[in-house]
Each structure stands twice: as structure tokens, then as C-alpha cells.
Image (tube, rainbow, N blue to C red):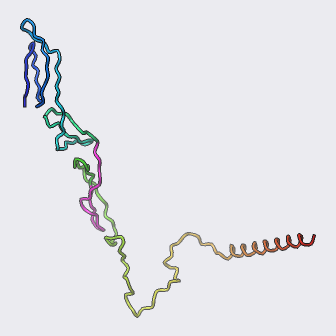
Amino acid sequence: MKIFEEEVNDELYTDFCSEPVHMNLDVTNGTGTIKDFDNIHEHKAGAEWKHNETSHWNECMNNCGEKLNEAPHSYEWVIDKEATATEAGSKHEECIVCGYEKAAVEIPATGTTGPANPNESNEPSGPSDPSAPPENPDDNSNNPQTGDSSNLVLPIFLLFVSGIGLAGTSICLKKRRYSK
């Protein structure tokens, strides 16, 4: 949309905006020169987001090509396909402002057949055979191994001997105070 076009001294001046343009001309002896050329165009952002790989923006509604509200993308992960125990999934990053999408990346297969909800348990809620004896709670076969295989007899013995030594020392000190 061409709003203004003027030729002065063999030069063509054109304004493609829909806003008014102020121009001061000095015309003497049949020739003119432009002294002041003010475009009072105000930029108004369009609703549509434009984007490239690094940023997004709105273009001016008046077709002047000015980029407004330019900013870097703000990404969040979007899962395209959930990974299962046997099949890989996929996800991609998507800008929450303009919708620009990066290339999808693979989510590795989980390799487990656990419950979809981590709060659920694979264990049955009650005994499967009511006539079976209950599990022994003192059985240590399910306890995690810590790597400490020391025997507790020696530390308990040393603690006992130290206690006897402290008791004997305190008794001796009390006898000395009262004997004076």
C-alpha cells in the first residue's frame, strides 16, 4: 500500500505506511529540496507471531516491516510419544509464546514393566494363598547389604569395659574426698 510518493530533484521519496507523513519543502526557482521529513508513524504489533531458530516477534500492522516485542524463545518439553518398556518414545522443546518447535529427540525405552503409576505396587495387597504361613518378619534376606561385615561383639565388650573403668574411677575419687 503506497501512501505517499514525491519526486524532488530527480529523487523519489516514498512512504508505504498508512500513517500521515509531515514533510517541509523549500521550493525556489522551480526546484525544491526536502528540509524535514518526519514520519509520525506509530508501530502497532500484529497478533501473529513470526519466528526463527533463536527468537520470536510481532510485525508492525502497518506493513513497514518493523519487528516488535522481539525476545528469545521460552521452551518447555512436550512429550510426543511416551516410552514403554520395549519401545522408545519421543519429545521436543516448544516455545510457550509463539509455538516454535525444535527437532524431536528420543526418550529411551524404560526396560521395566513396572506400574504406570509409581504410587501403585506390583505386590498383591493380601496373601495369595490364605493357607500359606505368614512371612517371617525377622528374615534378613531382604535387607540391603551395606558392605559392613564386622562383628558387634568386640565394640560391645569394649563399651562394657570402659563403663566399668569409669565407675571404678569415680568411686576412687569419692573415697579420697571423704577420707580427708
Going 64% across and 75% down the picture, which residue do you hit? 151
Whether residue 34 is situated above or below residue 108 in the rendered picture: above
**Is the C terminus in the top left, top right, bottom left or bottom right quadrant?**
bottom right
Rendering coords of residue 62 (x, y %):
13, 34
Q: Is residue 147 above or below residue 28?
A: below
* Residue 92 percent coordinates (x, y): 26, 54
Nearer to us in this view, 167 or 36: 36
123 magenta-colored:
no
View extreme (right): residue: 180
If the image is split into quadrants, where does the N terminus sit? top left
Where is residue 114? Give x, y as percent: 34, 72
| Res 32 quadrant in image | top left
Q: How many marks?
A: 0
Residue found at the far top of this picture: 29
Q: Position of residue 84 (x, y in %)?
A: 29, 67
Question: Residue drawn at (65%, 75%), measured in percent from left and top?
Answer: 152
Taking the image as shown, residue 73 lies to the left or right of residue 162, namely left
**In the depicted view, which residue is nearer to us: 153 or 174?**
174
Left or right, 107 with respect to 65, comes to: right
Q: Magenta residues, as a range?
A: 72-91
